[in-house]
Amino acid sequence: MKRKLLPMLLAMVLLLSGCGSFLHREYSVVEPHSSSYYEDTNRGVLRAENYQDVINDLLVLIGKQEKEGVIWLYGEAEGLNTDEIAEAACHEVQSETPLGSYAVEYLTYTIDATPRHYDAITVTIGYRRTPEQMNAMVHTTSVSALYDLLSAAAGGNAAELVVELSYFEENQKEEVYRIVSQVQHEKQMNVQQPWEVYFYPEGGNAEIVEILLKK
């Protein structure tokens, strides 16, 4: 049994065939209740048959704010062994996915490769966001809703607003900054320090925007 601790080497991801597609993929919403993600004989175990399934399973666990989970991986995928798949998937989820980069502090895993038709990956997840923060995240389709959402948050004296966008492109960051500045100037008589804005993941088409109204 092996134990690995992030940060992982990005080079592992590059071992995957067609590595560009892994680095620039679109991350769809993963529904935690979907039966296709669970091992039929054990609702406490997620199943995977390839690399993408492992990614989806990790996002299911994070979406449910689980601190630990078990994934049964059936067979090797993309020419990698289970250890390489787990390492690359953990790195991608924490560094490249919106939810992982926003919420996860670290991912560790162990592998039980006892001879059978699957390998068991036990994942431990450390969070840098509280359950209250994750539950308070607002989901919307586009940046156009940000003005109303931020105005309501500021009017309610909220300390922060976190928005998950269904559609967002790199060139829309300036629009986000403009909206944030507009709302702050409308809500505050004297702006001494701008509200802070963060995008997750940091590079590319971020889908989660965090706005700190108070420190």
Image (spheres, helix red, strand yellow):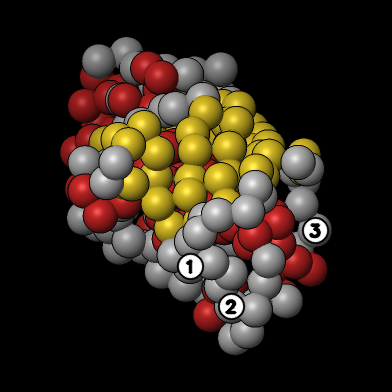
Q: What distance separates the C-alpha of mark 2 from that of mark 1?
A: 7 Å
Q: Residues within 10 Å of mark 3 (few under 14, many from 20)?
A: few
Query: Horizontally, is 149 left or right of 70 in the view?
Result: left
- Which three-letter amino acid code belongs to the residue tagged 3? Leu
Height in image: 107 above or below 90? above
Tell me where residue 17 appears, x and y as whole percent. Answer: 63, 84
Q: Look at the image and tell me in which quarter the C terminus lies.
A: top right
- Contact between labelled residues 1 and 2, with CB atoms less than 8 Å apart: yes
Q: Which mark is residue 78?
A: 2
Q: Residue at x 65, y 59 (%)?
A: 82
For marks 3 and 1 on the same chain, the one whose residue lies earlier in the sequence: 3
- Residue 69 at x, y = what percent? 49, 34
Who's the residue at 76% across and 41% down the image? 1
In space, the residues marked 3 and 1 are separated at their CA atoms by 20 Å
Q: Residues within 10 Å of mark 2 (few under 14, many from 20)?
A: few
Q: Farthest residue in the top direction?
A: 157
According to the picture, the residue beneath numbered tag 1 turns out to be 50
Mark 3 residue element: loop
| Foreground pick, 73 / 93 | 73
Image disc number at residue 9: 3
Q: Assign a secondary structure to mark 2.
A: loop
Q: Amino acid at mark 1?
A: Asn
Circle 1 sits in a helix, a strand or a loop, which is it?
loop
- Asked whether residue 199 appears in the rendered view, the answer is no
